Structure formats: structure tokens, C-alpha cells
Image: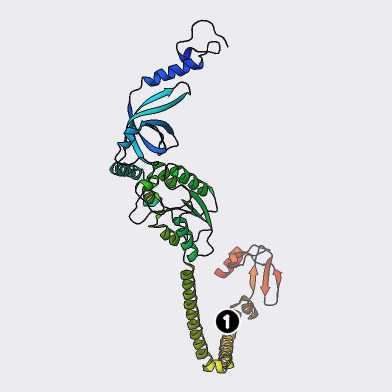
């Protein structure tokens, strides 16, 4: 596309109508990079290619998948106290440069130095304290190792002795154990990435109940990936319990501290991850023998008790108890009948006595002796002659029936006759 007028000075001023040509952008990037100062940078050598008086290498960040191309004078490489090899940790003084023709950024180094063991140990110690302060090494977050896992995930080197140690020792103890093996790089620039990817893949497998990360020892530089922060955090985030089997007893990478259980060697991990079938069989056999002995003792005791019970007289003649109780019941029933008869006769005598008393005191008995009861028409009993009226109809009740009468004299006349 052709443009008219001057080119924009700033990237923000460009547009579809006024773009920058590629050469302009490359030159501006080169100009910006050229203004950067020299700096010191640390990384891990991935590739090393000496070519004439210059060594070309790739410097990789040991924690993430990022790298830069570096050119170093061979004189600076030869001046190092030890030969420069891939995998070495170095610091170098360099100046960024941008190649406009290829559009690539690289570093032009002036000095290169190896990272000392002491520096590496100090950095690991600082990282360990930081992770410990976050609680990644606390015992209360560690998960128990399953007694008998369905499947064991194993992350180890390719065709390594560590793999054989774990698998053979585990199968010697429990022949039916099943392994899901992931062979990865356990040293070098890709170790962290490959181990973390294998760990996450096994952790996502629901059949895997425990994961073993194993390596058969090595120099401190070779074990550095197992003190890498990214790997340590990946183990801490894993859902599945993790066993660390890195190196030997003296090797203590940070992976040992974050793992749910630390094995001193891969062989030790093979013994820990599954139970010993022979030992468990011996336990089952011993328990079964003890249960059988206890059961036999219990049966013998119950048999002796049964013999003692059946030898008693009551068991020799079971009806003897019934007969004795029957005689006792008959005797008690006879006594109860006699007492009931006595009490019944006494009650009858008392009833007859009371009947006679009632009869003697009853009005009917009085009437039968010749007495009569005189009543007014309204039923009131006449108790005083002054209550009588002349020609008043009175009712007279005698022992056998009643009849009506009328008084022939008034109460006043009767009273006067009585006074004469």
C-alpha cells in the first residue's frame, strides 16, 4: 500500500492508512534495544555450539519455559574455572542486541561465570524457608499413604535403575501391584517441566492411589530440579499422596519436605508403597490360629458347663420338680378352700344375725305386735291429736293393710274431756 506524506513518529500514531514499513519498525526496535545498559543475567545453558572465536548458546530460565540466544567470545568461555557444558548454571554480563534482518533478539555476552555450589545451596535454603512459612511443609497437611493402592503412579528416569528398584521391590512384596509409569528427564533443563507434567497427568487419573517420584541419587547440580519451586508447589497441590524417593539418605531436596512421605532410596519406596504379602499372610494366619484357640477354649468351657448342668438330680428326673410343685399347689389350694369355707360360714352367720336385728327393729315388726301408723291425707304421720281436724280423713296402716278413719271429736273437745 502506498502512503503519502511523512511517516508517523510514534507507534500510537500509525493507522491502516499510514502504517510503518517493516524496516522502520525493526530499526525502531533496534534503536530501543541499543539504549539498554549492560546487565547481569542468570540461567541454565541448554545448547552450546562453539563456532570459530564465538560460542553460541541458549540460556534458559530453570523455573519456566523461557530462553534467549547468547553469543560469548571463546576467550571468556576458556577463562572459566571449569569447562562449560549443557545444563550448567551460569551468570553472564551481556548487552541485548536486535538483529534487524532476522527480527531476533539475542544477548552479546562479555563475561561468563559459573554459579557456585554455595550460592545454589543458599538459594535453596531461602526458598525452603519461604515455602515453610507458607505451610507447605507442615505435617498436618500431609496425607496418609494408602495401605493397598489399586495402582501406583511412578515418575522416574528413562530405563533407570530407580524404576527397577521401585517396581521389583514392590512386586516382590505384593506381586499383584499395578504400576502406571511415566518416564521423564530427571536432570537437565527439561526435568522440571517433564516431571511436573507427569505428576499432574497421574494425579488426574482416578485409578492412581499414590505417586512415587524416584531418582537414584546424583551430584547436587543434578538434583537441583527437585528443589525447584514450581515442582514443589505442584506436589503440594496434588490430590494424590506423593512419595519422594530422590537420591540416597544424605540427599535432601525440597521435594522430600513437601512430599507426604519421604523414602530414603527408591528401594525403600518400593517397600513402603505396598504391604508385604508374606507378612500380612502370617498376620492373618496367626490371627486365625488365635481365634481358633479362643473358640476351642470357649467350646470346652461350655461343654463342661453343660455336663455339670445335666449331672444335677433335677436334670436326671425333670418331672421331680413338677411333682413337688404340684403337691405343694394341691396343698395350698386345699388350705385356701378350707379358709374360704370358714370365712363364708362366718359371713353367713353375721348376715343372719344382722337380718334378725333388722327384722326386730323394722316398722313391720312393730305393726305385727298390734301397733298402727296414722297418717294425714298428705302422708304426714299423726303424732299429736291437736293436729287433727274434725271429719278429717286419716289413713291407718296396720300389719296387714291399711284403712281410712275420721275422728269423731275435735282436738278441743278431747282436750276438755281430758281436763275433767
Crowdedness of circle 1 by 10 Å Cα count: few (<14), some, many (20+)? few
Q: What number of labels is visible?
A: 1
Left or right relative to 395: residue 63: left
Rendered location of residue 123, percent (x, y): 31, 41
Question: On the rendered image, what quadrant is the C terminus found in?
Answer: bottom right
Q: Position of residue 411 (x, y in %)?
A: 60, 64
- Image quadrant holding the N terminus, namely top right
Name the foreground residue: 206 vs 11. Answer: 11
Q: How is the image coloured?
A: rainbow
Residue position for label 1: 354
Vertical arrangement, residue 281 with respect to residue 84, above or below: below
Q: Residue at x 65, y 67 (%)?
A: 375
Would residue 227 be found to the left or right of residue 156 on screen? left
Which residue is at the front of the view, 163 or 345?
A: 163
Q: Residue most toward the front?
A: 52
**Res. 367 image quadrant:** bottom right
x then y, percent, for residue 180: 53, 54
Q: Inspect this view and state whether residue 420 appears.
A: no
Q: Is residue 315 above or below residue 13?
A: below
**Residue 404's spot in the image, x, y percent?**
71, 69
Q: Nearer the viewer, residue 104 or 124?
A: 104
- Name which residue lies at 38% across and 25% down: 96
**Residue reaching furthest top?**
5
Q: Nearer the viewer, residue 53 or 407?
A: 53
Where residue 393 sits, quadrant-wise, is bottom right
Element on which disc 1 rests: helix
The answer to whether one can see residue 3 in this image is yes
Would residue 236 be found to the left or right of residue 3 on screen? left
349 up-or-down from 40: above or below:
below
Amino acid at each position: 500500500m502506498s502512503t503519502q506524506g511523512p511517516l508517523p513518529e510514534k507507534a500510537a500514531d500509525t493507522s491502516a492508512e499510514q502504517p510503518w514499513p517493516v524496516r522502520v519498525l525493526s530499526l525502531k526496535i533496534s534503536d530501543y534495544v541499543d539504549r539498554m545498559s549492560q546487565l547481569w543475567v542468570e540461567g541454565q545453558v541448554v545448547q552450546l555450539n562453539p563456532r570459530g572465536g564465538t560460542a553460541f548458546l541458549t540460556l534458559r530460565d530453570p523455573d519456566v519455559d523461557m530462553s534467549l540466544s547468547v553469543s560469548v567470545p571463546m576467550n571468556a568461555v576458556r577463562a572459566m574455572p571449569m569447562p562449560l557444558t549443557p545444563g550448567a548454571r551460569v551468570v553472564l554480563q551481556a548487552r541485548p542486541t536486535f538483529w534487524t534482518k532476522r527480527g531476533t533478539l539475542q544477548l552479546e555476552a562479555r563475561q561468563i561465570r559459573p554459579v557456585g555450589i554455595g550460592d545454589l545451596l543458599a538459594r535453596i535454603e531461602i526458598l525452603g524457608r519461604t515455602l515453610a512459612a507458607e505451610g507447605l511443609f507442615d505435617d498436618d497437611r500431609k496425607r496418609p499413604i494408602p495401605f493397598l493402592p489399586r495402582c501406583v503412579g511412578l515418575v522416574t528416569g528413562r530405563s533407570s535403575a530407580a524404576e527397577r528398584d521401585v517396581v521389583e521391590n514392590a512386586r516382590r512384596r505384593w506381586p499383584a501391584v499395578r504400576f502406571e509409569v511415566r518416564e521423564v528427564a530427571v536432570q537437565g533443563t527439561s526435568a522440571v517441566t517433564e516431571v511436573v507434567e507427569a505428576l499432574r497427568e497421574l494425579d488426574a487419573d482416578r485409578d492412581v492411589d499414590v505417586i512415587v517420584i524416584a531418582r537414584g541419587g546424583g551430584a547436587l547440580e543434578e538434583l537441583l530440579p527437585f528443589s525447584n519451586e514450581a515442582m514443589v508447589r505442584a506436589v503440594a497441590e496434588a490430590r494424590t499422596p506423593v512419595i519422594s524417593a530422590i537420591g540416597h539418605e544424605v540427599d535432601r531436596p525440597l521435594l522430600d519436605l513437601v512430599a507426604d512421605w519421604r523414602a530414603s532410596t527408591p528401594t525403600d519406596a518400593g517397600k513402603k508403597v505396598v504391604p508385604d504379602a508374606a507378612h500380612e499372610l502370617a498376620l492373618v494366619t496367626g490371627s486365625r490360629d488365635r481365634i481358633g484357640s479362643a473358640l476351642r477354649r470357649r467350646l470346652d468351657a461350655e461343654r463342661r458347663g453343660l455336663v455339670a448342668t445335666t449331672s444335677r438330680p433335677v436334670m436326671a428326673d425333670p418331672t421331680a420338680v413338677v411333682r413337688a410343685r404340684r403337691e405343694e399347689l394341691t396343698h395350698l389350694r386345699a388350705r385356701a378352700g378350707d379358709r374360704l369355707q370358714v370365712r363364708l360360714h362366718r359371713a353367713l352367720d353375721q348376715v343372719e344375725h344382722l337380718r334378725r336385728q333388722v327384722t326386730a327393729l323394722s316398722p313391720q315388726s312393730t305393726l305385727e305386735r298390734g301397733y298402727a301408723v296414722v297418717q294425714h291425707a298428705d302422708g304426714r304421720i299423726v303424732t299429736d291429736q291437736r293436729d287433727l281436724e274434725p271429719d278429717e280423713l286419716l289413713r291407718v296402716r296396720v300389719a296387714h293393710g291399711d284403712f281410712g278413719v275420721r275422728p269423731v271429736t275435735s282436738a278441743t273437745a278431747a282436750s276438755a274431756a281430758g281436763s275433767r
